[in-house]
Amino acid sequence: MAALAAYTIIGLSLGGIFSLAALGIVLIYRTTGVLNFAHGAMGMFSTFVAWQVFYGWSHPFWPGWISTLLAVIAGLVFAALMGLFLEFAIFRWVRTRDPVVKAVITIGVLLALQSAASLIWKNNQYHLPIYLAPQAATFTIADVPIGANNIVVIVAALLLAFGLGAFLRYTSFGRAMRAVSDSPTSASLWGVPVGRVGAVSWMLGSLVAAVAGILITPFINFDTTSLTLLIIDALAAALIGGLVSLPLTVLGGFLLGLLETYPTIWIQSIGFPRLVALLVILAVLVVRNPRGFAVAAK
Amino acid sequence: MTSRLMVRVLVTLVAFAVLARIPVGFDVGFKFDSGLAVIWAFGLLSLVLLTGYVGQISLCQATFAGVGAYAAGMMTATFHVDYIVAVAVGVAAAFALGIIVGLPALRLHGITLAIVTLGIALVFDRYVFQDHAFEWFTGGTGGWSVREASMFGLQMDSSKHLMAAYVVLLALFCLVGLLMVNLHDSGAGRRFRAIRDSELAAATMGVDLIRYKLLAFGMSAAIAGLGGAFYPLVAGNVSPQPFWLFTSLQFAAIAVLMGVRYVPAAALGGAFMAFVPDVLTRFGHGSLFGHQYEISYDWFQIAVGVLLIVQLIALPDGVWGDLRHRVGHARSTVGALGGRRVKVA
């Protein structure tokens, strides 16, 4: 029973990260029509920027929390700038193109980011994770020890998901974003700055990806490829939400995290969770009407 | 035999004769690259069929090649069969997997199909090619090693008889390429292109969607698998690395970059994919203005990504397609100036 609870905690932590990564994908897809295969790679690159600040450039005499804070800020600022750069340098120019063409362009972004990171930070090298909470700190709830980092992940995922939802629902810019995601043409007729909405979506999406990347480092084999390949889990969660719904996406992320974790009780395999993700994707796509996804793709 | 077909056969024969002679006299490294170039060209050719002709997107072509390679490796290493049997088994295995992947594709298209094929590529990369449960197929962590093999009694191996393998590969590629060009205008090719332009319209005109989509996936996988089945022969062993997810993504990127609708673009892309990284790592180091520099493989992939982005914004029909249009345009301009009518295309 205690083992089951422990696996549940791991699954929920993973799920929180999948939710965050998937939220960014859904946000960018809804407002700009770009299905971003490079989302994992973008999160990976920002995470490595944070890692560089945390382990490379921090002064050993600083208190730990200052280097952590600086690292996180550096990673997030970099992520926001990267999102803006991608929008202005690439995706602004292909707004009217077919969704498949835009998706293929993101594959180019993925390859370039992946190789650039492996050039700078070496591909197969072991990297120490970034701990936001002390590594050994645990809380005990109902006799089940829970790592502080797990709690940080779950709480951060829920907070960001609700924050993003509230931003979209209650602020005027959020309303503009929802208008663009419903129909860019009519939104622009109503005076919504469609270009600026796209840029902010890219920035926000990239930010959320960076948060997901920084949070996941204690839980996985932290190198350039593993973070890039998170994209498949994120896409699975996003598909559960139909590439549209934010709450369903978050729910899907947590569900996928649990589904991928429970089999590891019996099956000791690094690759098996990927199979679970693929089966979830297939199940979602076969059960739902696939043409439903075409609606959001302008 | 129509005159157009005759011209195509002639062009293919000349291309074969020239390409078969090129690696002679170079060192083993370049001979290996030549073999690899044809293997990758098969992977790109499979995308010409699937994406260029039928309009289906796939991000798991390297998986098909990998299945072909592992099946061929398993057959030679375990059963010591003639290599032609190994190739046949490799192609059959890839074809079967292609049909299986084609099944969800019956309901999907565009980006959802891209997601599913990406997932399949990742599952094979991280699970099937690397897990203990599939050791009978992948030969464990070391993979299969194929030191020597013979095909029709012709000795071939990676160390001494690499050229024999290269020539056979090249001949097969020329043959399949020629068949692909002819397929474009055949009845099946017209049905394929009808599916690409509009599945609904194709179905209305009586094209059996299920049959032709599955056929396209199976044939495409078989083409990729045919190239992959020669990988153990050319490289001497099989490992998961050459067929991992990023090779699949590179296939998609380079196929689009070179022009996904044209058969010669696949050959061009294969050469690009095999030679450029090797030349870069071989000659791309030294010192410039007192600074040591070293150009590693990563620079190649960065270049592929950046070139793909630039190409999709600037030259939507790919490098080969754009060249074709330019040549055609120049020819028609010259024709117009000279007052002669020149048939283009």
Image: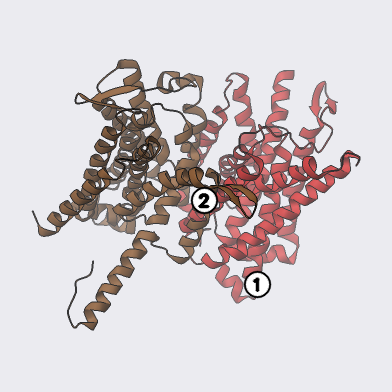
Chain colours: A red, B brown
Residue A105 shows up from this direction:
yes
Mark 2 or mark 1, whichever is nearer to me:
2
Report whether residue B198 is seen. Answer: no
| Residue bearing the label numbered 2 | A107
Q: Which of B201 and A222 is in front in this view?
A: A222
Vertical placement of A235 versus A31: above or below? above
Q: At numbered mark 1, what does the secondary structure look like: helix, strand or loop?
A: loop
In-image side of B199 versus B287 (left or right): left
In the image, residue A179 lies at what x, y percent? 63, 66
Chain containing the residue with disc 2? A
Outermost residue toward the left in this view: B1
Where is residue A140, by image quadrant?
top right
Q: Neighbour class for label 2 at 10 Å: few (<14), some, many (≥20)?
A: many
Instruction: Identify whether A18 is placed above or below A23.
Output: above
Amino acid type at mark 1: Val
Q: Which mark is residue A192?
A: 1
> What residue do we see at 36% from left, 65% from top?
B322
* Amino acid residing under circle 2: Ile
Q: Above or below — where is A15 with respect to B9? A: above
Q: As drawn, is A273 to the left or to the right of B32?
A: right
Quadrant location of residue B99? top left
